[in-house]
Image (cartoon, rainbow, N blue to C red):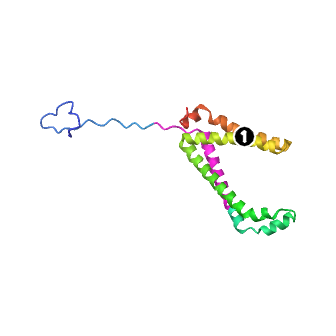
Amino acid sequence: MTADSPPPEVPPIAGEPYTPPPPPPYVYPTMRQRPLGVTLLAILEALSGVFLILTAIGSFIIAGVANMQDVADQLGPDFPQEFIDMAPILFGVMGVILVILAIIAFLLTYGFLKGRGWAWTLAMVLVVLSIILSIVGWFLSGFNPAGLASMLIGILIPLVVLLYLNMNNVRAWFGKA
């Protein structure tokens, strides 16, 4: 017995060794249940990240080995030579941007699976930006019917995700309830 342990409730009988009482049974902590939709969103984000990485690799390859003079010959003599000269730099910059977007997608995947509050906030920001960019894209397309259909799809899917992320059980998973 140590100095910190309480004395036994019943003093031991002379001659019998003291046996401490059994410890209370272990109670396992309750685990939060991740909503199925959050798991599906995490899978889609992971696939998006893989696709972005592959696209970035392709962009870097094009920047390094593409023969821009062949492209210039196909575009014709009226195409500005400055754009042809800058193409490798633009493909390289595009590759870096795609890698950054892939990292964000993988971070979102992790945050979705672990129920991190910052992942919910970041997803909300990205969904709202997606809706805004769909509307701006329609304006820039000159209000054509094909642009309208693209805008409606570009708004509908993020809107469904926005509504889903604001459901009570989903907000609770991210600690936002």
Instruction: State left or right for residue 32 relative to residue 17.
Output: right
Q: Residues within 10 Å of mark 1 (few under 14, many from 20)?
A: some
In this view of the protein, which residue sits in the foreground, 17 or 168? 168
Instruction: State left or right for residue 103 relative to residue 141.
Output: left
Q: Is residue 123 above or below residue 73?
A: above
Q: Quadrant of residue 22?
A: top left
Residue 31 placement (x, y as % from top left) = 48, 38
Range of magenta residues: 30-57
Residue 19 placement (x, y as % from top left) = 22, 38
Residue labelled with disc 1: 132
Q: Looking at the rendering, in which quadrant would you find the N terminus? A: top left
How many numbered marks are there?
A: 1
Residue 153 visible to the viewer: no
Residue at (46, 36) in percent of width and height: 30
Residue at (21, 33) in percent of width and height: 8
Residue at (82, 41) in percent of width and height: 148
Q: Looking at the rendering, in which quadrant would you find the C terminus? A: top right
Badge 1 amino acid: Ile
Residue at (74, 39) in percent of width and height: 155
Q: Is residue 107 above or below residue 162?
A: below
In this view of the protein, which residue sits in the foreground, 107 or 19? 107
Residue 24 placement (x, y as % from top left) = 33, 35
